[in-house]
């Protein structure tokens, strides 16, 4: 998997804008189609804030057929946290975004991200001094990328 983008200090007025910013980075890198950010917002609108996996961390994604063109992972650190409506893990300051072109790779990417998160990725991302540090922490956590 390829780490595409790291963005630091991103301003977002709410969760929808935060999700669009995180997913738009994948579009900008050519890894997702133009409709991918809106598809990622729809995931939360239709299913609730289940993408908020841990304290302050959301995993932004949509189904592969909704615009995944390549396997990419990105990280966005917000300038100020936003509320998703999650009962336990709000507010969110970190968003990991990913896209894949097929369902099998989608599940594998989810598993790799879950392993990295359980090994302390969120703490390393929060401790990163800048955008380059964010990218480095993500690349180290996902070494096959």
Image (cartoon, helix red, strand yellow):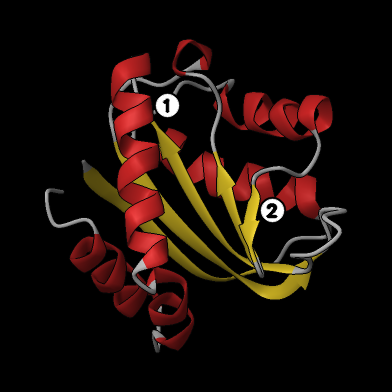
The answer to whether residue 31 of the structure is visible from this angle is no
Tell whether label 2 touches label 1 (CB within 8 Å): no
Q: Which mark is residue 18?
A: 2
69 versus 120 height, above or below: above
Rendered-image quadrant of the N terminus? top left
Q: In this figure, what is the number of numbered marks? A: 2
Q: Which mark is residue 66?
A: none
Q: Position of residue 44 (x, y in %)?
A: 75, 35
- Residue drawn at the location 82% of the way across and 30% of the way down: 45
Q: Which mark is residue 32?
A: 1
Tell me if mark 2 has few (under 14), some (14-19) or many (20+) residues whose alpha carbon lies within 10 angstroms of its own.
Answer: many
- Residue drawn at the location 69% of the way across and 53% of the way down: 18
The quadrant where residue 140 appears: bottom left
The quadrant where residue 70 appears: top left
The answer to whether residue 72 of the structure is visible from this angle is yes
Q: Circle 1 sits in a helix, a strand or a loop, which is it?
A: loop
User: Cα distance, mark 1 to mark 2?
Assistant: 17 Å
- Residue drawn at the location 39% of the way across and 84% of the way down: 128
Q: Position of residue 23 (x, y in %)?
A: 54, 40
Q: Which numbered disc, 1 or 2, marks the residue that appears first in the sequence?
A: 2
112 versus 78 height, above or below: above
Tell me if mark 1 has few (under 14), some (14-19) or many (20+) residues whose alpha carbon lies within 10 angstroms of its own.
Answer: many
């Amino acid at each position: 998997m390829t780490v595409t983008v790291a963005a630091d200090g991103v301003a977002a007025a709410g969760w929808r804008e935060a999700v669009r910013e995180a997913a738009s980075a994948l579009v900008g890198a050519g890894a997702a189609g133009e409709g991918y950010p809106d598809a990622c917002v729809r995931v939360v609108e239709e299913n609730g804030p289940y993408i908020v996996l841990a304290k302050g961390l959301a995993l932004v994604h949509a189904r592969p057929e909704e615009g995944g063109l390549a396997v990419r992972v990105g990280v966005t650190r917000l300038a100020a946290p936003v509320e998703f409506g999650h009962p336990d893990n709000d507010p969110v300051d970190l968003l990991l975004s990913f896209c894949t072109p097929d369902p099998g790779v989608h599940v594998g990417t989810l598993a790799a991200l879950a392993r990295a998160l359980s090994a302390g990725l969120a703490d390393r991302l929060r401790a990163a001094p800048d955008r380059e540090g964010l990218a480095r922490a993500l690349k180290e956590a996902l070494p096959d990328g």
